[in-house]
Amino acid sequence: MSTGKRRPLVVGNWKMNKGPQEADALAVQLKVVIQDYPAVDVGVAPTFLALPAVAERLKHTAVQVVAQNCHPEVSGAYTGEVSPEMLRQLGVTWCLVGHSERRQIFGESDSFVGQKVRGCLRAGVLPILCVGETLAERDAGQAEAVVQRQLDAGLAGLPTDQLASVTIAYEPVWAIGTGRNASPQQAQEIHAFIRSYLEDRYPPFVSRSMRILYGGSVKGSNAAGLLGQADIDGALVGGAALTRDDFVAIVAAAHQRGS
Ligand code: 13P
């Protein structure tokens, strides 16, 4: 368990919701209200199609722009894909990598996810590496082994000085979009496991500074309990990020922790 205090980060993953106009409308609301929570880093992840409008709207504001996915390469014959370099040109700060929906629905392998992490860092985009076990894996007692395998591949080959630019998001698949969040203790257990994974392998500053977010049915009503845990440094929010008040309630809980 870590006693270090890291600045909280809350990211809203809008998934395949909100076209450019709706996304811009929410960005307009958020850019004003988020100013009230200076102790928190906040980001929103619209669809690729809405990224230009949202990036323009949030330029020079406290809300950072996040991409939901990328391809590892800089450019080339990869129909339908977007490179980290293109995201950087648009002003994107973070990029989700290896979200469980990408792994499960689109068959992304651990090693492909690792390539994306390295591709983001090459381009100067900060990766948020998503890890987490399915219900069957948890029931089989394999939660830690699965997370370890995903971390091994996701962080493979990174020089130590680049590790501090990576954020981890622990999202147990059984808690995503199900309304069934991990209890604060269940989440803390895996977060502490991830922290000790980092401690065992890298110099102390890595485990002390790297933020580990929790994701999976985070809401205003459960955010304080989750964010009160020693190793939970923020939240990756799906459904509750789609409306201003629900999202702001989570940011407010993170602000409490951070101030
Ligand atoms: P929900 O908050 O809707 O469970 O989604 C979590 C998630 O997948 C965020 O990336």
Image: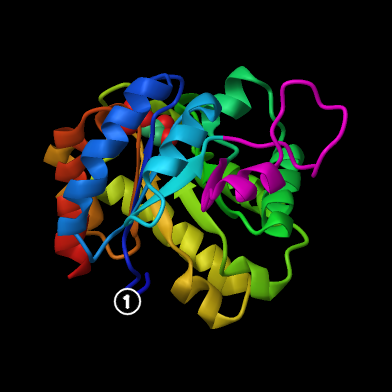
Q: Which quadrant, please, contains the N terminus?
A: bottom left
Q: Nearer the viewer, residue 14 or 191?
A: 14
Q: Which quadrant, please, contains the C terminus?
A: bottom left
Picture layout, residue 49 above or below residue 66 = above
Q: Is residue 189 magenta?
A: no
Position of residue 229 measured from the top left corner of the image (x, y, whole percent):
25, 59
Task: Give the overall secondary structure of the magenta segment.
Answer: loop
Q: Is residue 181 visible?
A: no
In the image, taking residue 100 as reference, residue 201 lies left or right, namely: right
Position of residue 234 measured from the top left corner of the image (x, y, whole percent):
33, 54
* Residue at image location 65% in from the left, 59% down from the top: 124
Position of residue 101 measured from the top left corner of the image (x, y, whole percent):
53, 25
The amino acid at mark 1 is Thr
Q: Residue furthest bottom?
A: 204
Estimate how packed mark 1 is, as few (under 14), some (14 to 19) or many (20 or more) residues with alpha carbons within 10 Å: few
Q: Quadrant of residue 201?
A: bottom right
Q: Residue furthest right?
A: 77
Q: How has the structure been colored for display?
A: rainbow
* Residue at image location 53% in from the left, 48% down from the top: 92
- Which residue is disc 1 drawn over? 3
User: What residue span does the magenta drawing correspond to?
Assistant: 69-96
* Residue at image location 72% in from the left, 33% down from the top: 109
Q: Nearer the viewer, residue 212 or 56?
A: 56
Q: Element under label 1?
A: loop
**The residue at label 1 has a CB less than 8 Å from ligand 1:** no
Q: Quadrant of residue 102?
A: top right
Count the marks: 1
In the image, taking residue 76 as reference, residue 24 lies left or right, namely: left
Position of residue 244 measured from the top left corner of the image (x, y, whole percent):
19, 34
Q: Is residue 81 magenta?
A: yes
Q: Is residue 113 visible?
A: yes
